[in-house]
Amino acid sequence: MRKYFAIEGTAKALVSERDQNFRIGATDGQSYLLKIANAAESPDVVDYETAIVKHIASVDPEIPVPRVVDAIDGSSIVAVSGPDGASHLVRVLSWLDGTMLRNVEVDASARRQLGTSLAQLGLALRGFFHPAAAKPLLWDITQVANLADKVEHVEDPELRRICSNFISRFSDDIATTLKRMRAQVIYNDLNPSNVLVSEDASRKVSGIVDFGDTVHGPLICDVAVAAAYQLAADDDPFAGVLEFVGGYHSIVPLEVAELEVLLDLILARAVTTVIVTSWRAGIYPENREYILRNAEPAAINVRYLESLDRDRAFDRIRRACPISNSARIMKQVARDSSKLVKRRQELLGSAYRLFYERPIHVVQGENVWLHDADGRRYLDAYNNVPLVGHCHPHVVAALSEQAVTLNSHTRYLHDLVLDYAERLLALFPNELNRVMFGCTGSEANELALRIARAYTENTGVIATQFAYHGNTMAIAQLSPSYAAAEERADWVELIPPPDSYRGGSGQEGENAAHAKFLADIDNAIDRMAARGVAPAALILDAGFTSDGMFPPRGGLLSEAAKRVRAAGGIYIADEVQSGFNRFGKPRWGFELDDLVPDIVTLGKPIGNGHPLAATVIKDNILDVFSSKTRYFNTFGGNPVSAAVGLAVLDVFERDKLASNAQETGRYLHQQISALAKSHSLIGDVRGSGLFAGVELVLDQNPMSPATGATKRVVNAMRENGVLISMIGPNDNVLKIRPPLPFQRAHVDQLIETLDRCLLVAKENSVA
């Protein structure tokens, strides 16, 4: 190490099958991995494995693979003579910290994370090739038929019979099918000994090691090899496979043909493991324990997979990996969009509005993707309603199962409604301990307004100048972005949002914007009083989203609540857009401040698009309302909706979407901020988590809104396969608000597309 790499330290031998590996504890406190290749190893293969990790690190530095440490002479590989005179190729890699996955308990969330990690690794390898990628590999499951002469080494007769029969079937049917599959260089060995995870509860993947089995082959084989290790020893062994494959599919959608062979390929991996380990254990008895470490689990898996009801298993795979219809089917429903628009206007009227200059005819959704009638896929970076992803299979299954059992209203007793109420209320401060259900956010806000008026015996309401809170008659009065032309009633006061961008630069400007906002509340209360009106409520979306996105720092919301409460009103937090960790760390938008609202309203995201809404209230406030009137909603809180709400909470918690919103959201804002440095159109980047407002301006002073350029960007993004929208009174703020399963790879696609579209918009940057 000192001679070739200028590294001094102590070496600790690591268990390996073919090469010699050592952990080097260097005197400078760093750790390294020393790899000494078997003398029989081809130099091309060693170069290939080295080139792979270099390529991954250059394409996606966030993927936790070892980094190559160059020798003193600048080379990555050096030839060293061993004691017997044989030449060995030596490499040094950085050491990755973490706990080996095989030593920890793996839950559903961890399995999905493994799937997304492998998908991201595959994306990084998509453009890589090396002549040695075509090397013959014993563990290449596409070559399982070549193991026919080694089946005799399997001692158990029944297991031997299963392996032999499978090889015959593989040769006759599966091998030819695989030749039509997508192929690239694949990792091919995501087993629990090759994955390191963090020691905290998140079990985040911290390292992917050992690239000795990488090979050029069908992409689905990479998935199958890893999935073979997700068969769990419990009542439903296949559930782990579905979680893993579902995670992979959320990043790299799998094709129907690939899903159809997945089960056979998982079995191919298990059969390969049984045969190869049985054969090698006899050849290398001194290394028998290491070689056979996966033999018994593989034998159990072979028997289990052979016994599976294949139709039912495939049906479960399809539900875990919802996939768009084939182009042929989509073409059948494709229509001239202009004819659809005309028909829509004739039937629905012209009050309805469509997104984009060239409207999209969507026919299917899955995870963060929407598909149109022509088979084109769009990255959805706008829709918050499918909170846990479009058509999530767990949510769809919950809806279907309850729908075929019972659906009724809340004047009958039913456990599911109460179960959902308990789980939902557990997410709020203790004071917010009652919940009433509806179908829409508009209904939730309408009910909140009724409760506020009953409790305070006042009528006035304060909202912001370009807010959106719903479309009922009363709530439309508080939604000027939706009903700008409607005359306001005398009980309404609209105030400007705390515009931290135009309020001045830095902290001083934000302080000024906040001070003005609080003064505007005081003035609104005074104007009401002059008309003989007292405030029943102040209703705010914590991010001031429709106003242009101005998430406040701590202190503003609580001070606003104090002012309205002092005047006899209550504070209503509209969390339809800002709830469920949309802003990253805070679960609710009102938690951007040290504040407990009097009422909180939730809308369709809590049902992942199913008509479900909730009004969460302090019990003393609801008691007053209940003493004066009663509430009933035929479909609010029905058993099907409750089942859906529970399923959404299951997915939200299981997939750790709160932490994903924080981590992926941080990456999103870093990338947008970096983009702003090269695009003068971007005047300000606001928000946090998976919620961003990007204000486009013609110049930095006087900050003229670039409305025309903003529309061009939004429509250009649509044409390039990414969906966003725009907000603000001048329609000059890009609104980025994707479903919560959004991953770093999706951010990269969004940013790359936004970069190009900003350049196009800049070419004609008149307002």
Image (cartoon, grey):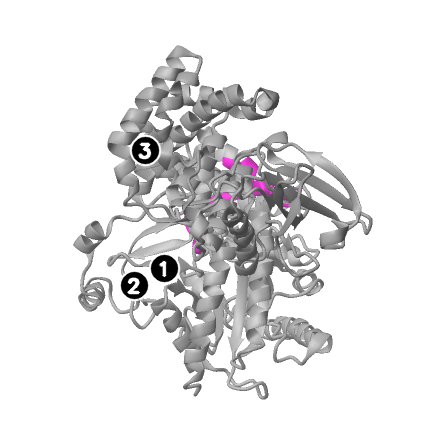
Front-most of residues 419 and 209:
209
Residue 70 forms part of the magenta stretch:
no
Say whether residue 497 is visible.
yes
Indicate the secondary structure of the residue bearing disc 1. Answer: strand
Kind of residue sitting beneath label 2: Ile
Q: Is residue 551 above or below residue 711?
A: above
Indicate the secondary structure of the residue bearing disc 2. Answer: loop
**Quick check: marks 2 and 1 in contact, CB under 8 Å?**
yes
In-image side of 101 versus 25 (left or right): left
Precedes in sequence: disc 3 or disc 1: 3
What crowding class fits label 3: few (fewer than 14 Cα within 10 Å), some (14-19), or many (20 or more)? few
Residue sitting farthest toward the right:
27
For marks 3 and 2, give the CA distance: 30 Å
Kind of residue sitting beneath label 3: Asp
**Quick check: marks 3 and 2 in contact, CB under 8 Å?**
no
Write down the residue under mark 2: 360
Write down the residue under mark 1: 378
The x and y percentages for residue 303 are 40, 19
Write down the residue under mark 3: 315
What residue sits 27% from the left and 56% below the top? Answer: 375
Indicate the secondary structure of the residue bearing disc 3. Answer: helix
Kind of residue sitting beneath label 1: Tyr
Q: Nearer the viewer, mark 2 or mark 1?
A: 1
The span shown in magenta is: 420-443
Residue 424 forms part of the magenta stretch:
yes
Say whether residue 532 is visible.
no
